Image (cartoon, rainbow, N blue to C red):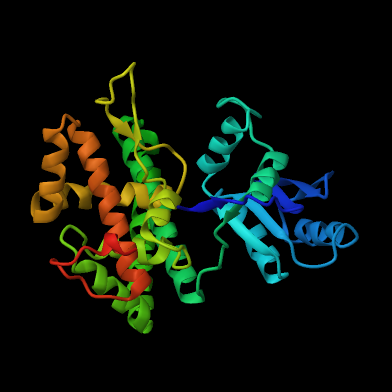
Amino acid sequence: MHTTVHHTPKTICLGLDIAKAKLDACLLHSGKRHRAQFDNTPAGLRALLAWLRPLHDGPLPVIMESTGSYSLLAATVLYEAGHAVSVLNPRWIKDHARSDGRRNKTDTLDAEIIAHYGLTHDPDLWQPASPAQAALRALLRRLAALGELAQMEARRAETSDAVVGKSIARLQKHIARETAAIEAAIAEHLAANATLHADCERLCAIPGIGIKTARWLVAELPRHLPNSRTAAAWCGLTPRLSQSGSSVRGASSIGREGNRFLRKILYMPALVARRANPRLKAFADSLEARGKSKMSALLAVEHKLLRHAFALLKHQSAYDPNHHPLNHS
């Protein structure tokens, strides 16, 4: 599990509801509620720390939802200030709010609900990525952004007037040069970092996973998570089953919560593993034999691949086709 219920409620927790420009803070402390809003900038976070000092002197649990780059700055600043930071999948907070009767599923969650989650649960603590891992992540995300830009310009080229065709062509050439430069920087970075290089080779041994997928997994997966089940939930690869009445034979789906880069990158490897990995092929076949749809079975293969990859990274172990790492991770 990614978290446990705290049967003896804690008396203090800071909840942060983070957006691109602003963050809302709610400190629940011994039955009292303290609220404030800050800019989501280095200066704004320094102001947050100054606001906290007269309210509580010392480290405290801080809970926030994972909002990609929006939450990274706050998590880093509060971690470096000595606080116990947890960065959670938004789905977990949403489920908590519904179970507690505080919000229905369409309402916006706020900092108080996030803080209340921290009072009643013991979530895993967040740790920053190593500098080498953070650099690889930044390079890969830049590569992904360039790829999206290239696709946009290709679509424009199909329907644009001739008068702007030259402009589009020039931009496409520039994107191609930048893409090649980033690819070279990634290769150079991996060659200079033995641990990252070894981790990529470790993952490439798994049938279905190639170097492009391995790079993303090495860059994005946090190593501090306690087990592979938690990693799958963090990533957003825990399938949801569509139900109608007493039927549970509907198609599974995954939500938009979690790490969008890993959810996207694992689709093609799952297709390959579905055919080429004997164990995962048998697993998917058994699901379909029990009435699951092909897409449900494929999502389950993605889930297994992610968990298998995390187990190898977590324990720094080599791939063994005769071993079941998920039984122990």
Would residue 157 be found to the left or right of residue 95 on screen? left
Q: Identify the residue at image location x=69%, y=38%.
A: 110
The answer to which image quadrant residue 246 occupies is top left
Query: Residue lying farthest right?
Result: 54
Q: Nearer the viewer, residue 257 or 285?
A: 285
The residue located at (69%, 49%) in the rendering is: 119
Looking at the figure, which quarter contains the C terminus? bottom left
Is residue 18 in view from this perspective? Answer: no
Q: Position of residue 188 (x, y in %)?
A: 35, 78
Q: Residue at x 78, y 56 (%)?
A: 44
Q: Is residue 296 visible?
A: yes
Hey, which quadrant is residue 284 in on the image? top left
Q: How many marks?
A: 0
Query: In the rendering, at what x and y percent does residue 304 appear?
Result: 26, 52
Q: Residue 25: image x %, image y %?
A: 76, 47
Judge from the rendering whether residue 13 lies leftward or rightward of residue 5; answer left or right: right
Residue at 27 percent across and 48 percent down: it is: 302
> Farthest residue toward the top?
245
Q: Is residue 27 left or right of residue 172?
A: right
Residue extending furthest front? Answer: 8
x and y percentages locating residue 303 in the rendered image: 30, 49
As rendered, which of 188 and 33 lies closer to the eye? 33
203 up-or-down from 2: above or below? below
